[in-house]
Amino acid sequence: MCPLFFLTGKAFMKIAFVLLAALLATGAVHAEAEFDVEAAAGQCAACHGAEGVPSDPAIPIIHGQEFFYLYTQLKDYAAERRANDIMSPMAAQFERSQMKALAQYFSEKSWPMIQTEAQEGDAQLAQRAMSRGQCSACHGEWQGDSRIPRAAGQQPGYLEQTMKDLKNEVRLNAAAKISVMKKVEDEEIEALARYLGDL
């Protein structure tokens, strides 16, 4: 006869719980071991570009972007702290360890060059925007630093939309940036986006 037959209800439940936890842990380890970061990254390439140049100017470059920033954005998309019809369900399919693997994968890529050009007067308007928003206090030379994303050479269309989304409280996962961008005029945002894209 099975030894479990002689256990009391509480003892049986304890053993059953331990066994279930072990099975779940084994499954999680197995699922993690099976995670193919290259295949997952292939899903991203449809929009972000196989060579790192996005198919649409409103889509950001993620090749060479900061690891921690990428990981945080994936978490925020999955939790809908940063909502997007494509990215939210895409990010929600990944476990946190898989998000980290993807963020690491893209952070180790080379930042691509894009074709963009600032307009006459952009530098002055951009400097005014940076001064008004005290941007350099966090962004420094715009090359990125852990939680701070690289903005130099980023897609101007994406930068413009992001700054306007923050200003208009469409994007809600960066409270400090919301208050900063509310001080900046739309024409300054547009000039700053072109200026940064051209760096």
Image (cartoon, rainbow, N blue to C red):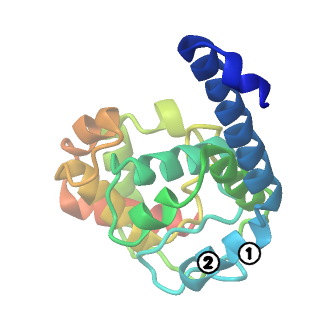
Asked whether 173 or 119 is in front, the reply is 173
Q: Are marks 1 and 2 in contact (CB under 8 Å)?
A: yes
Q: Which residue is mark 2?
A: 43
Residue 63: x, y in percent?
Answer: 69, 66
The crowd level at tag 1 (other Cα within 10 Å; few <14, some 14-19, many 20+) is: few
Q: Is residue 87 above or below residue 147?
A: below
Q: In the figure, residue 69 lies in which quadrant?
A: top right
Q: Is residue 191 visible?
A: no
Residue at point 77%, 31% (across, down): 2
Q: Is residue 190 visible?
A: yes
What's under tag 1, amino acid-wise?
Answer: Ala
> Which quadrant: the N terminus?
top right
| Left or right of residue 105, residue 190 in this image | left
Residue at point 32%, 48% (across, down): 129
> Which quadrant: the C terminus?
bottom right
Q: CA distance from mark 1 to mark 2?
A: 7 Å
Asked whether 81 or 192 is in front, the reply is 81
Q: In the figure, residue 65 lies in which quadrant?
A: bottom right
Residue 24: x, y in percent?
Answer: 67, 41
Asked whether 4 or 190 is in front, the reply is 4
Residue 168: x, y in percent?
Answer: 16, 53
Residue at point 48%, 30% (across, down): 137
Dot 1: what SS? helix
Residue at point 19%, 54% (across, down): 185
Q: Which disc is residue 70 wearing? A: none
| Left or right of residue 19, residue 14 in this image | left
Q: Is residue 87 above or below residue 53?
A: above
Q: Which disc is residue 39 wearing? A: 1
Q: Is residue 142 above or below residue 193?
A: above
Which residue extends farthest front?
A: 1
What's under tag 2, amino acid-wise?
Answer: Gln
The crowd level at tag 2 (other Cα within 10 Å; few <14, some 14-19, many 20+) is: few
